[in-house]
Image (cartoon, coloured by chain):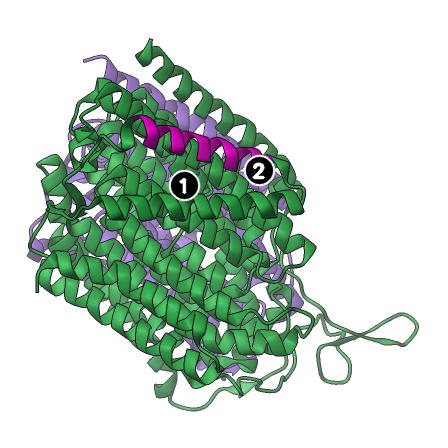
Chain colours: A green, B purple
Amino acid sequence: MQIVQLLLFLILFPLIAAIFLLFARKTFESGWIVKIASLGIGVVSLYLLAAGFDKGGISYAVSGWAIDLVMIIIELVIAVYLLYLGIRHRKYSAVILVLVQAALILWFEATYGHKIELSYNLFFDQLSIIMALIIGIIGSLICVYSLGYMETYHQRHPEIVDRRRMFFFMLFVFLSAMFGLVFSNNLVWILFFWEITTFCSFVLIGYSQTEEATSNAFLALSMNLLGGVAFAAALIYIATMDPSGRLLELNTLIYSGYVFAIIPAVLICFAGLTKAAQLPFSSWLTGAMVAPTPVSALLHSSTMVKAGVYIILRFAPVLMGTSEGLMIALVGGITFLLTSFMAISQSNAKRVLAYSTIGNLGLIVACAGVGTYNLMWVAILLMIFHAVAKSLLFLCVGTVENRIGSRDIEDMGGLIERMPKLAVMMFIGMAGMFLAPFGMIISKWAAIEAFTTAPFGLVFIVILAFGGSASLFFWCKWMGKILSVMRHQENVETGIRPEKWVVLYILTGLVVMVALIFPLISSTLIEPFVMQVYGETTRLAQANITIMLLMLGLLIIMPFSMLFSRKAPRIAPPYMGGMSTEGGMKYTGSMGISHDLVLSNYYLKNYFGEERLSMAGTLVCWGLILIAFIMIAGVIL
Amino acid sequence: MIPEPYSSIINAIIYLLLAPVVGGLIAGIDRKVTARMQGRVGPPLLQPFYDVGKFFEKENLVVTTTQNFYALSYLVFMAVAGALFFSGGDMLLVIFAFTLSHIFLVLGAYASFSPYSHVGAERELIQIIAYEPMIIITAVGMYMVTRTFYVGSIVQSTTPVILYLPGVFIGYLIVLTIKLRKSPFDLSTSHHAHQEIVKGVTTDFAGPNLGRIEIAHWYEYVFLLGVVYLFFAWNPLIAVAAIIIAYFLEILIDNTTSRAKWQLTLKSAWLVAGTLGVINLGVLYYLRMVVP
């Protein structure tokens, strides 16, 4: 089978599944459709890996005026629908942005669009494979997980209208749009899929139709539309400068030289910053957690924000060594630093995860903005590790929330006794996020080494040193909370549906697996891609990889040491200052009343409080973005 | 440049065997010198070994059996970190293994859910984030001077690293104060009875587990002082003298200051890392990258 057929299959198949889901009458039916479609998407993504890992940088001629026409019609329908909703909910900023963008797109189509006939609309290289695997495997696993989650969700929240058919429809449209986005070479197509993902996330965030959900959905919409407007402006600029439209092809544009490419690059990277929820725009992603947890998992790990960093990665060669690129990198770096601090002060598990996502994306943006070949390597590695570990963590938190009815970390005390299997999975996910020798730390390490040779790399090393240690703090105290068993508690790990378990097991396995086989991922996918773009590539030294693998092995066998202790240790009560009463975790107060012992983590709000930091970050990052814009204005003039 | 595999493995083995002996002796000397500073006679030089020997004869008393695992993992990964360091491995990898081992200590303290060890765990974490940026800056600083992250190559460098990294060295001394659990930064646990009776992070470790943690400390001492050696590696005699002076300085600071609050610890450690460390690196960066 030809690669191009696989690409088209991956774009269209989720769409077909979505349409079937829209018409599925029973939950039973939609359950099977979701499972079969997910399996299909996953298998074809893997097949794409097998068929295409050794082929890089091929563009495919798929074209037709009909496709363009359909795209425009869909865009206009969505715009009208958004206008209607915006006016009904009195969200006028969103209305204005929809109007501006629709006007830009119509103008573009009327002036240039119909004249431009691009031949190479689809594109395929190793980065596309990596993205396809992230979307196809992790995304579809999340869809399967949603089946069970949504059932419990509606049992728990009877007040929310059951719109599950629409929900699953949107999930699969989302996957389809993501595939379209990463396979498209034509920037007009990319913008189309870009807008579809914005729309999908808008609908999914607002799923519960509460006031908070609606207003957060509109916040996400407005911010992403702002990016979309910049994207559309980039298209118009390219078409004005080059009426032949050849430069609307991504693979031509990024090699067209600094003077021409930097302007669309900055505009599109601005769109990427909005989508990747970087600092002035981070509030849409933290707000998005009102949605059901699988939606958060999807937004954070395999779709949406990954689209944002993906497009910035594509433009990294253009940004390399430019001061505009440095500004974008600084936005990412400052986002990483401040969100890592802010996560310390949060006790809501999903918020901690959200800030950690934004921070890690910031790191990817920082790498892509500086844009040297070894940082490109790091950025892709980061993206892979982050997608796997973060999806697992979100789904774990979702499952815990379903069972104990809270997503607050303080309520997760003793989870290791209440839900042992899930606690271990969360543990592995968190280890994947910050502990050697798992994924993220490998990237952090490689990033430090790569920044030592990059221009202005010192700034980013300092950011990494401080931000990295902050992230260590919030992950570790969360781990500690799960471990500390205050009093004996019942095991409540029952009634979790088997398909949820399957998904969680697979993702846990993936976290460990990518840590084990990352040298293979690097040599078959990342290195060829970096080689092809930059003509040189990098990797970790073989000796270090061996040591890492040995450490990982040691970490895996260490828990078994508990099985081989010579004799069982004697269990004693914990030290309570000699004051405990009733043989347990209680203190006797001055009036003879016994109080339960309550332990709580440190949140250091005075130091790492959200408000002050995000205010500062917003100001600084807006400043940096403005400087970047002024710089490209200078290039135009 | 990666050092010869055989000699590096031999170095690692020598470290694994000898570091506890050297570390224990250092602990013994530390106690002796401290006692003299306080006008006491102090315990015999080998007292730390007697103590640990006794720990292992005691019954294994735990709050939860997982504590065995955490204490053992702390020891194992501390030994791994040190062995990597002395075998000439990548400095950043050494730092990550070092951090990993401390995470196990913290988790062990959390697992025992005594309020004292809980506070100890939180404070230990604050200590970790206080010193971690500086230790990374140290590694990067050494890279900027010697153009390598490999300890094996840094140690062979003929450049007097200390002359290029005076600010980083001062920052590293603060790391040393925190990591040797010396006043004023001995927040999470202290070796001295004058600071506390309930021993923070190690409150609920007893018997063999406490012994393992003590041995891990010995491994840690040798590793931390090994980093001091790197600053002076071009001349081994000066290096050894520097280690002795640095350690003496730490004991002196320990005995002349009282424990700081965590706020002050975090602020001062970050302030020094952010000013002395970063400015030092900035100047180096300017000299190395921009001028030529």
* In this picture, residue A263 sits left or right of residue A357: left
Front position in the image: A134 or A459: A134
- Which of discs 1 and 2 lies nearer the camera? The answer is 2
Point out the residue furthest to the bottom here: A567
**Is residue B218 in view?**
no
Q: Amino acid at mark 1?
A: Gly
On the picture, is A462 further left or further right than A41? right
Quadrant assignment, res B218: bottom left
Range of residues picked out in magenta? A93-111
Q: Position of residue A632 (x, y in %)?
A: 35, 17
Categorize mark 1 by other alpha carbons within 10 Å: few (<14), some (14-19), many (20+).
Answer: many
Counting from the top left corner in percent of width and height, residue A180 is at: 28, 52
Q: Which residue is mark 1?
A: A362
Q: Which mark is residue A95?
A: 2
- Residue at position x 61%, y 62% from top? A208
Membership of A97 in magenta stretch = yes
Tell me if mark 2 has few (under 14), some (14-19) or many (20+) residues whose alpha carbon lies within 10 angstroms of its own.
many
Upstream in the sequence, badge 1 or badge 2? Answer: 2
Residue A552 vs B178, above or below: the answer is below
Mark 1 in CB contact with mark 2 (< 8 angstroms): no
Q: Residue A482 in magenta?
A: no
Quadrant where the C terminus of chain B is found in the figure: top left
Measuring from the top left, give residue A502's x and y in whole percent: 37, 80
Give me the chain letter of mark 2: A
Identity of the amino acid at label 2? Val
Dot 1 falls on a residue whose secondary structure is: helix
- Quarter of the rendering containing residue B220: bottom left
Q: Residue at x 59, y 46 (%)?
A: A84
Asked whether, in this view, residue A32 is left or right of residue A352, the answer is: left
